[in-house]
Image: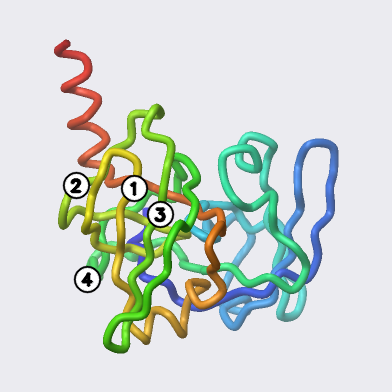
């Protein structure tokens, strides 16, 4: 489980295909604190640390993960949002995040507004994921509050700190992002669908 509060960024240093798997090597300021078999969220995708060497660590993404997330589009030199699993007994500053991406979305608009940024994202509503006004959403692992919720799109406001310390500062119109919808909302949506 994660909170959606990004700890740091990691730089992609190597990408190695092995069959349908992708081994991703990352340089990060938290590498020395990691251990083998530890779960770390990468742009909101929970992956297991399989190797640590100096300031670099490696995780493996399987084909299903590559098909359902934006990790298959990574290039050497790109940055990803990183968060280690939450610690029980600590404050939950974001919201409950599983690290299981539901689908991808596409950045459709970026607007500067009084020192902050408004980002709008479109997504495929046929997959039965929903947002609600003032509900939670996770975008590339970042816990955010939804507004302008619509059937196929929503917006989020990004403050300067988040913009500077996450991959939001690299987004452009057309950027593909990982979306994890609110777990409680997913259960409610599923239960309502079963009643029909």
Question: Is label 1 in contact with label 3 (beta carbons under 8 Å)?
Answer: yes
Dot 1 or dot 3: first in sequence order is 3
Picture layout, residue 27 above or below residue 58 = below
Report helix, strand or loop for mark 2: loop
Q: Nearer the viewer, mark 1 or mark 4?
A: 1
Picture layout, residue 177 above or below residue 66 = below
Question: Is label 4 in contact with label 3 (beta carbons under 8 Å)?
Answer: no
Q: Residues within 10 Å of mark 2 (few under 14, many from 20)?
A: some
Q: Which mark is residue 121?
A: 3
In the image, taking residue 181 as reference, residue 72 lies left or right, namely right
Q: Residues under labels 2 and 3: Cα distance?
A: 14 Å
Q: Residues under labels 1 and 4: Cα distance?
A: 30 Å
Dot 1 or dot 2: first in sequence order is 2
Residue 45, horizontal then vertical, whole percent:
52, 52
Q: Residues under labels 4 and 2: Cα distance?
A: 24 Å
Picture layout, residue 136 above or below residue 185 = below
Viewer-closest of 59 and 68: 68
Residue 34, horizontal then vertical, whole percent:
58, 70
Report helix, strand or loop for mark 4: loop
Q: Which residue is mark 4?
A: 91
Q: Residues within 10 Å of mark 4 (few under 14, many from 20)?
A: few
Q: Residues under labels 1 and 2: Cα distance?
A: 11 Å
Residue 49, horizontal then vertical, whole percent:
63, 58
Q: Which mark is residue 162?
A: none
Dot 4 or dot 3: first in sequence order is 4
Q: Which residue is mark 1?
A: 153
Q: Which mark is residue 132?
A: 2
Q: For the point 19% across and 47% down, which residue is it?
A: 132
| Picture mark count | 4
Dot 2 or dot 3: first in sequence order is 3
Q: For the point 46% across and 82% down, which residue is it?
A: 165
């Amino acid at each position: 489980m994660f909170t959606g509060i990004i700890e740091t960024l990691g730089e992609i240093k190597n990408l190695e295909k092995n069959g349908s798997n992708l081994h991703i090597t990352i340089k990060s300021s938290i590498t020395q604190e990691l251990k083998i078999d530890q779960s770390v969220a990468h742009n909101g995708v929970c992956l297991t640390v399989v190797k640590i060497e100096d300031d670099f660590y490696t995780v493996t993404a399987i084909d299903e993960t590559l098909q359902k997330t934006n990790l298959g589009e990574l290039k050497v030199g790109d940055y990803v949002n990183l968060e280690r699993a939450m610690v029980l007994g600590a404050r939950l500053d974001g919201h409950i995040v599983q690290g299981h991406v539901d689908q991808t979305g596409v950045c459709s608009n970026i607007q500067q507004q009084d020192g902050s940024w408004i980002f709008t994202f479109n997504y495929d509503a046929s997959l039965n994921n929903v947002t609600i006004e003032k509900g939670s959403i996770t975008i590339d692992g970042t816990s955010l509050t939804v507004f302008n919720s619509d059937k196929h799109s929503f917006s989020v406001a990004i403050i300067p700190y988040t913009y500077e310390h996450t991959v939001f500062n690299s987004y452009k119109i057309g950027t593909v992002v990982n979306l994890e919808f609110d777990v409680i909302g997913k259960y409610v949506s599923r239960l309502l669908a079963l009643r029909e």
